[in-house]
Image: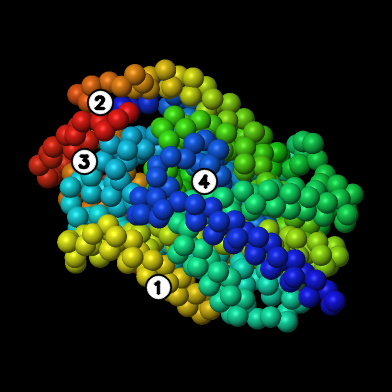
Amino acid sequence: MRRPSWGAILLGLAPFVATCFSVSLWDRIDPIVLGLPFNFFWLILWILITPLFLWGAYRLESPRDPVPPRRSSDEGGPL
Amino acid sequence: MTPSAIALTIIFSIVGVGSFIGFYAGSRHKMDLEQWTVGGRGFGTVLMWLLMAGEVYTTFTFLGASGWAYSKGGPALYILGYQPLAFLVSFYILPLVWEVGKKYQLQTQADFFLARYGSKHLAAFVALVGVIFIVPYLQLQLTGLGIIVEVASFGGIGRTPAMLCAFTLVAAFVFVSGVRGVAWVSVLKDVLLLFAAVFVGIALPYIYFGGIGPMFAAVIHAKPDHLLMPGATKNLGHSWYVSSVLLTALGFFMWPQNFGASYTAKSGDTLRRNAVVMPLYSITMPLMLFVGLTAFLVLPGLNNGDLSLLTLVRKTFPPWFLGLIGGAGALTAMVPSAILILTAATLFAKNICRAIFAPNMTDRGVALLARVMVLVVTAAALFSAIHSSASLVSLLLVGYAGVAQFFPGVVLGLFSRRVTMPGVFAGLVAGIALLAFLMLSNRDPYFGVNAGFIALCVNFAVTGIVSYLTPTEPYRFNEMPAASM
C-alpha cells in the first residue's frame, strides 16, 4: 500500500517524542502552570495541540488520495 | 421515596430510553450480515464519529481513570498520554485498512488477515485471540455496571443481580439491532457522559477546595509524590509509562471492534478527518483524574479505587443527581459492551466456525450462529466478572497487551511486501505465548517494563526473522482490481 509521506510521518512523530519518550523531562510538579502540576499541564497541552499536527499531516496526505480512481496497478507501489 | 429508590429509578429510566433508541434504530433496516456487522458500509463522519466515541469512551473512562488517580496517582497519567497517540496512529493506518476492506468486502479483523496472508488458519487464530481478549474488556464493563448499581442502591442491590439484568438488556438489543442500533444509542450516551464528566470534574474540586488549582495545591501539600510516577506504586515508573503508552497507542486500533469499526466508514478520508479531531475528545480524561485526586483527599481509605467517583458523588450531591451520573455510567458500560459482544460473536461464527468447521454455511447461517454466540460470549464475561476482583484499569491493560500482538501483522501487512504468512503466524504465537507466561507468573511489569510491550517486541523480531527465512509470497493486495473507489 501507499506509504504516508515523510513529512506526514515526522508530524506524527513529534507528539510521540513530546508525550511518550521524553517522560523523565516533564514528569515533575514545578513549575505549576495555570494551577496544574507541570506533568498534568504538559499532557493536557498535548491533547489540545496534537490535532494541529494531525491537521498538518492531513494537508500533506489528502491531496495524495486516489480520487479520481487510479488504475489498480498504481496501487500499493513498491515498499 | 428513599434516596436509593430515586437514584435507581433515574438510572433505569436512562437505560430504558437508551435501549429503546437501540431497538428503534435497528428496526428500520433489514438485518442481513452486512447490515448487522458493518451497517451497510455507509456511515459518514458523524455516525462514524459517534460509533468510534461509543467504543472509545467506556466505563473505564468514567470509573477506571478516576479509580487509578485515586489509588495509584501519577501512573494514571499514562491515560492522558496514550489516547491522543492512539488516534494519531489511526490516522496512518485506518484509511488503508478501509481501502482493503472496501476492495475485498471485509467484515471482521480476521478477514483482513485472510485477505492479506491467504490462510484461513491464521485468520481463525487471529479471531480466537481477539475473542479471548475481548472477554476481559467486556468483564471490565460488567464490573463497572455492577459498581454503579451497588453504589446507587447504597449497597441494597448486589453486583451480581445488577450485572445480570443489564446484560440481558444489552444482549437483547445487540441481538435485534446490530451495529446501527449501537451507534444511535451512543448519541444519548455521549451527551450524558460529556455533561457528567465536565460537571463533576469541575464541580467536585470546586466544592471541596475552591477550584482545580487549590485542589492540586492541597495534594502537593499532603502528598506530592502521589502526583508523580510511580505514585503510590513501587514499579510503575518511567520505563513502565513509556512501554505502556507505546503498547496501548499501537494496540488501540488493533482491538477487533475498533479495527472493524473502520469498515463502517464511507471513505478512507472520513477516517483520516476523524483521526484529526478525535484527540480532542480525550479532554474529558483529565477531568476524571481531577475527580480521583479530589476523592484521594476527601475520602481516603476506600478499599476499591474504582468506587471513588461514585462514592464522592453520592456524598456530595442529592440522590437524583447520583441517578443521572449513574445512568450515564450505565450507558457508557452498555454501549461498548454491545459492540464487544457483536464483534466477538461475528468473529466466532464467521472466522472460526464457518471457516474451519463448516465451509458450506450460508451468510444467513452465519448471522444466525453469530446471534447464538451473543449469548455465549455474554455468559463467559458474566461468569468471569462474578468470579474476579481485578481493578478496571488492570483488566484493560490485559486486553491491550493481547490485542496489540496483531500490530506487526497489520502494519507489516500493509507496508511490507516481504512479510510472510509463516512469519506473522510465528510472531503472533510467540508474542501471545510470552505474554501468557509473563502474566500468569505475575511478572507484569517485568523489570519495570509493561509485559505486553516485551511480548510485542519479541513478536516483531520473530515475525521479521521467520519472514526473512521463508520464501517471498505474492503481494495479495495487488491481485484484485478495486471494486469502486
Q: Residues within 10 Å of mark 1 (few under 14, many from 20)?
A: some
Is A51 situated above or below B57? above
What kind of residue is marked 4?
Met
- Numbered disc 4: what chain? B
* Disc 1, SS: helix
Number of the label disc, if any, that sits on residue B352: none
Q: Nearer the viewer, residue A54 or B161?
A: B161
What kind of residue is marked 2?
Glu
Give the residue number, with chain letter if any, for mark 1: B376
First in sequence: mark 1 or mark 4? 4
Give the residue number, with chain letter if any, for mark 2: A75
Q: Nearer the viewer, mark 3 or mark 2?
A: 2
What kind of residue is marked 1?
Val
First in sequence: mark 4 or mark 3? 4
Give the residue number, with chain letter if any, for mark 3: B419
Q: CA distance from mark 2 to mark 4?
A: 28 Å
Residue B347: name its quadrant.
Answer: bottom left
Same chain, labels 3 and 2: no
State the residue at coordinates (41%, 33%).
B267
* Disc 4, SS: helix
Q: Quadrant of the N terminus of chain A?
A: top left
